[in-house]
Image (cartoon, rainbow, N blue to C red):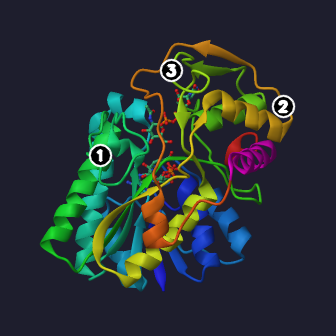
Amino acid sequence: MAILITGGAGYIGSHTCVRLIESGYDVVVIDNLDNSSAESLRRVEAIVGKKVPFYQNDVRDKDALRRIFTENRIDAVIHFAGLKAVGESAKIPVAYYDNNLISTLYLLEVMAEFDVKRLVFSSSATVYGLSKTMPLVEDMPLGAINPYGRTKYFIEEMLRDLYASDDGWSLALLRYFNPIGAHESGTIGENPRGIPNNLMPYISQVAVGRLPHLNVYGNDYDTVDGTGVRDYIHVVDLAEGHVKAVAWALEHTGCEPFNLGTGKGCSVLQLKDAFEQASGVKIPYVIAPRRPGDPDTVYADASKAKAVLGWEAQRDIAQMCVDTWRWQKNNPNGFES
Ligand code: NAD
Ligand code: UD1
């Protein structure tokens, strides 16, 4: 049973390849390496002790997609490939619409040509926009607030339209909360290009001395200590959610969104403290102005994924910090170390 993984060399894709292979699936990866390195796949191969068939192609290259479906018996697809930086998406929106929307359209066309109608899609909690009601539940109104978020929202709408037109499709829309952490081996993990936008990679780069201090974006939110609260989820839990979603997609038809989060909130300072505890390294910080567009609190109601997929996050914040630190300490410059 082979699963095509678009964006499989990336952060979440590489961890998902490991858990899929360990669960008995064959995987085939397509990635243009725009935001990743072939080294991550070499390390996936070292973890699982098996070669991972890899096509270094863009998902917007339909002929390459056709070649993959011809050369492999693909049963389902997990579509991670895409651009993901919120700030950048406001500066180069056309590149975001081009990459995220066109890649998905072409992928769906080629899947239909080869009669493969099972897809797990990387959506995001960002599709809920600035909802004030927490926890976030799948049937709440959607409304993205930046170009990146709108690409996810538009793709979700496209997939709902597709299912309405043909109920032979199986479409799992996974809305991730805040993925952090790394594989327990410390050999694969998040490897952002340039200065990280997200909190955890920023903290871990301060810890290894690549950055001088953490900027805490606002301490006057209506939260436990005034700093922003998020639902951080271990990337290996997320990977296991994909294994469950693939199993669901292979056995059912439908178009279903699922929140993948822990259901628990953690503030910026709580995460910093947990990281210090895990690493034994002090993280200097300064209070900076709020980052525009940041909500005070975001966390999931993850009960649908538990009820329907049989999935629930297992790893706590301490584990997320220990595993991030092992990866960052062993690879201070990421895969370039
Ligand atoms: P990532 O950048 O590490 O992985 C994405 C991979 O896709 C990269 O390896 C990149 O080279 C590849 N890629 C991009 N465009 C491509 C294209 N047109 N053709 C082929 N390959 C292409 O990102 P990630 O954190 O692993 O995220 C995976 C998916 O999950 C993305 O769709 C992202 O939007 C979504 N997501 C991520 C987060 C997060 O915090 N990491 C949160 C919510 C949703
Ligand atoms: C961001 C994206 C979101 C995306 C998610 C992926 C924005 C506005 N939102 O979410 O669309 O799905 O990443 O993980 O970019 N913080 C600091 N200092 C830092 C970095 C962050 O204090 O250097 C704070 C933020 O204000 C926030 C929390 O840490 O309260 C988490 O931030 P981040 O990791 O960027 O994630 P989100 O903003 O939740």
Figure check: 212 above or below 329: above
Q: Residues within 10 Å of mark 3 (few under 14, many from 20)?
A: some
Left/right placement of residue 285 relative to residue 282 reads left
Residue tagged by mark 1? 151
Left/right placement of residue 247 relative to residue 252 reads right
Image quarter of residue 105: bottom left
Q: Quadrant of the C terminus?
A: top right
- Does the beta carbon at disc 3 come under 8 Å from ligand 2? yes
Mark 1–mark 2 Cα distance, whole angstroms, equals 38 Å
Residue 194 drawn in magenta: no
Circle 2: residue type: Val
Residue 24 place in picture, x, y as percent: 59, 83
- Does the beta carbon at disc 2 come under 8 Å from ligand 2? no
Mark 1–mark 3 Cα distance, whole angstroms, equals 28 Å
Task: Depth check: give the residue in front, 61 or 117.
Answer: 117
Residue drawn at (47%, 28%), measured in percent from left and top?
296
Residue 114 place in picture, x, y as percent: 27, 82
- Element under label 1? helix
Q: Residues within 10 Å of mark 2 (few under 14, many from 20)?
A: some
Residue tagged by mark 2? 281
* Highlighted magenta segment, given as a residue range: 316-330
Residue drawn at (78%, 28%), measured in percent from left and top?
209
Figure check: 324 above or below 38: above
The numbered disc on residue 221 is 3
Earlier-in-chain disc, 1 versus 3: 1
Tell me whether circle 1 and circle 2 mark residues in contact (CB < 8 Å). no
Q: Nearer the viewer, mark 1 or mark 3?
A: 3
Q: Nearer the viewer, mark 1 or mark 2?
A: 2
Task: Depth check: give the residue in front, 4 or 152.
Answer: 152
Circle 3: residue type: Tyr
Left/right placement of residue 129 relative to residue 273 reads left
